[in-house]
Amino acid sequence: MNLVPRPPPSASELIRAGAVVPARPWPRYRLAPEAWADLADRLATDPLRLITLWADETTVHALFLDADGDPLVASVPIELRRYLALSPARPAVSPCERMIRDLWGVEAIGALDLRPWLDHGNWGLTAPLSPRPGPAVWPPEAPEFTAMPEDERTGAFQLGLGPVQSFATGPVHLRLTLDGERIARLEVRLGYAHRGIVRLLRSRTPAEAVSLVARIDAETTVAHQSAFARAVEAAGGWRITARAEALRVVMAELERCAVHLHHLAQVARLVGLDRAGTSAGWMRQTVLAGSAAAFGHRMMMGAIVPGGLADAPAETGLAALPAVLDRLEAALPGLAQAFRSGANRLSGRAGIRASVAANCVLGGPSGRASGHPLDVHVLPPLHLEAAPVARLQAGDAEARCRIRLDEIARSLMLARRLLLADPAGPVHRDPLPDQDLFEPASEGFGVAESAHGPVWYWIRIESGRISALHIHDPGLALWLALEQAAPGLELDGLRLLCRSLGLSVSGADL
């Protein structure tokens, strides 16, 4: 009798074999250190996508997306301030491991890189989020960059750009290794814009945290507010009104349009497409003016709170939004034609390979332009049946612009559909969340699609206050993709790559 050996369990099966920890809308799975080690081994050959890694006082957590795009969360206890690294199998998670070491003093055993990420030696203490922070190291160590022995042999030299002035908006240091006029290697050093957001939010009530969450990143303020509010609402196990959820999505789509138009204008002006840059700039101002008229703020900061919206929208401004959408839809074909006329200035330049997009788990237009579609509109609580997501394979600057144009059209369509079906009813829950609405310790996840990709929140609330929190902004993945896509480019190509990616420092540094 021939016995067919059972195949080894997949990474997803290893995770789901763990002990279930209640969380909404997706449970966490607690793994023993041995099971975590098996998971780390399995990830070497399993395609399971790892989105982010974080820690709290006792545990390290990892957020994955399974083959169906559903979130899957694994946790492992911290033992002797250590845990087994996942970066050997998923190099893109290395910055998360370095951040955990900086913030919590917990080391990833076998990690690809043990250098500090956020701590540049200027903090007043070490491991500031740990139960017992340590004293600052003196004298502070200078930032380290990777030195390659072959650089000296080949005559390559290093050029530093930033952190005060660089090709990107915001403080960041780009260390380029140049072989002649071409980039042989690029290393990004972030952390200059770190504000300690997680530490500032801990111990606050959800209502107290709203104003700070809204100011994490101006380009993705609606996405951050929405994801945070959904995480709080999931932790409390309650739903908001249909009208509040619909208006949240309208606001998110308006924000995505404004951000896409901003970056299209930046790219157009860089390559000399002045007509396209002017048109995109006018369209962006039209979006911002319509947002202000309906929701009280051009960027819609502070408009979303746990429980719904902070205030009811201005009915006259809301009634005028369809006309705003009409003007944008009428102008969009001309903008697309202006970019088509200058396609030769973008085609084949500043490319990101599909393998890089997959390794970095790129979302948003940068991922979709490189054959890596990722859209969270279909996840709870939205379950939106949106138009099919555009997907290209070229991965160059032209493809990213085409995806942005397609997403603007898609966002306008979705916003119009929701405005036409505007359900009646209040826009906030009464009362807003307080201690009585939460169990002794409640966990929730929230996600929202920003113009750069999904924004994720995990939150634990105890006695009505935030006791633990994690924020994942898609900006970090864009910086990792920049490092891998830059080799082979000249400086002009690097500038185009930075502009077309729409890099964000504040979202990545938190």
Image: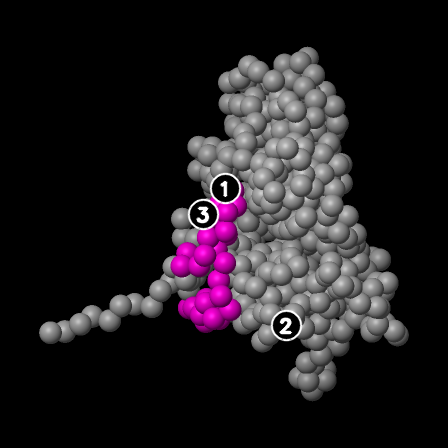
Tell me how far mark 3 sits from mark 2, CA to CA.
32 Å
Label 1 is placed on what type of residue?
Answer: Pro
- Residue 347 appears in the picture as rendered: no
Name of the residue lying farthest toward the left: 1
x and y percent of residue 441 in the render? 60, 45
Helix, strand or loop status at disc 3: loop
Name of the residue lying farthest toward the right: 139
**Residue 23 forms part of the magenta stretch:** yes
x and y percent of residue 63 in the render? 53, 54
- The residue indicated by pointer 3 is 70
Helix, strand or loop status at disc 2: loop
Helix, strand or loop status at disc 1: loop
- The residue indicated by pointer 2 is 80
Compare residues 157 and 20 and report the one nearer the observer: 20
Residue located 43% across and 53% down the image:
66
Tell me how far mark 2 sits from mark 1, CA to CA.
31 Å
Residue located 72% across and 61% down the image:
130
Q: Which residues are magenta?
A: 16-45
How many numbered circles does the render carry? Answer: 3
Label 2 is placed on what type of residue?
Answer: Leu
x and y percent of residue 436 in the render? 64, 33
Q: Is 400 left or right of 160, judged from the image as shown? A: left
- The residue indicated by pointer 1 is 25
Q: Is 260 left or right of 156, judged from the image as shown? A: left
Question: How is colour applied across the structure in the image?
Answer: one colour
Compare residues 84 and 435 and report the one nearer the observer: 435
Residue located 73% across and 32% down the image:
302
Tell me how far mark 1 sits from mark 3, CA to CA.
11 Å
| Quadrant of the rendered image containing residue 136 | bottom right
Q: Are marks 1 and 3 in contact (CB under 8 Å)?
A: no
